[in-house]
Amino acid sequence: MTVSLTTSAIRAMKGKEKISMLTAYDFTSAMLFDRAGVDMLLVGDSLGMVMHGRPDTLSVSLAEMILHTRAVLAGVERAMVVTDLPFMTYERSVDSALKNAAKLVQQSGVRAVKLEGPYYEQVKALTGAGIPVVGHIGLTPQRAAEFGGFKVQGKTTEAANSLIEQALRLQDAGCFALVIECVPAALGEIITARLEIPSIGIGAGPGCDGQVLVMHDMLGLFDRFVPKFVKRFAELGQEFQKAAQEYSRQVKAGVFPGPEQVFNMSQEELEKLKQ
């Protein structure tokens, strides 16, 4: 019997086993990643860009997150699923965070959420209400405009100390794991060593307790831009295009469908039909 990973199981992996995490947005990818043994699946608001073709994540709605989360959960047996709270669903107040997180949990079935930035009171309220939270520091895409774009964070002593403080305060507020994005590798390692909860790095170096990538980046499905921290483990975008080109060629040439792809009826019934 397959046993689903829990927050306690993820926390227990710190210092013992590296944690693998990928984004997923639909049933099929979630099913395949789960079968592959990926520990955590993030239904990221990055879906606005890689699934809906938008320039950023800011217009992603809670309803969209719920829809994609339902699809992901349908494909999962073992992996722990976490869903992003989208932009402006938690920042304004503790009450808005509780209301929107409850709606996400109740309507999608997900059991853990992620939010970006140092929103300590919101984290306390959510965890106090029984909703596990993953924090996110460093480059927080929902606020990339504040940083002048998608830039590395924590490069000065002052900025690095600020991120260390954020990490520790998010841990104290109740986060069971923390995503660290786009910081110098040395800082990622320092934060990880200071934390009792697992760190999940994305552009934060190998010293983190785990790693996360956007599935479209990892699989070579998205080429509008490729961040420095991305390693492409396949070039499926090229394979998709080649397959579609060959399909189109065969259709136009009358090669597909062939004899092995068609259904037949008896000659006797066919003769009756012609009469």
Image (cartoon, rainbow, N blue to C red):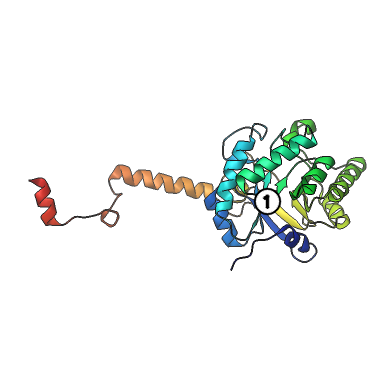
Q: Nearer the viewer, residue 110 or 202?
A: 110
Q: Which residue is mark 1?
A: 111
**Residue 221 locus on image (x, y percent):** 56, 46
Question: SS of the residue at dot 1?
Answer: loop
Quadrant of res 98: top right
**Residue 51 locus on image (x, y percent):** 57, 40
| Residue 63 visible here | yes
Q: Is residue 207 left or right of residue 160?
A: left
Q: Residue pushed farthest bottom?
A: 1
Q: Is residue 130 left or right of residue 3?
A: right
Determine the residue positioned at 64% across, 61% down: 4
Q: Is residue 183 left or right of residue 256?
A: right
| Residue type, mark 1 in image | Arg
Q: Is residue 89 above or below residue 81?
A: above
Q: Nearer the viewer, residue 151 or 164?
A: 164
**Residue 212 locus on image (x, y percent):** 69, 52
Determine the residue positioned at 68% across, 58% down: 20
Q: Nearer the viewer, residue 54 or 220?
A: 54
**Residue 150 locus on image (x, y percent):** 74, 37
Local crowd size for mark 1, using a 10 Å CA cut-off: few (<14), some (14–19), many (≥20): many
Q: Is residue 230 left or right of residue 178?
A: left
How many numbered marks, from 0 up? Answer: 1
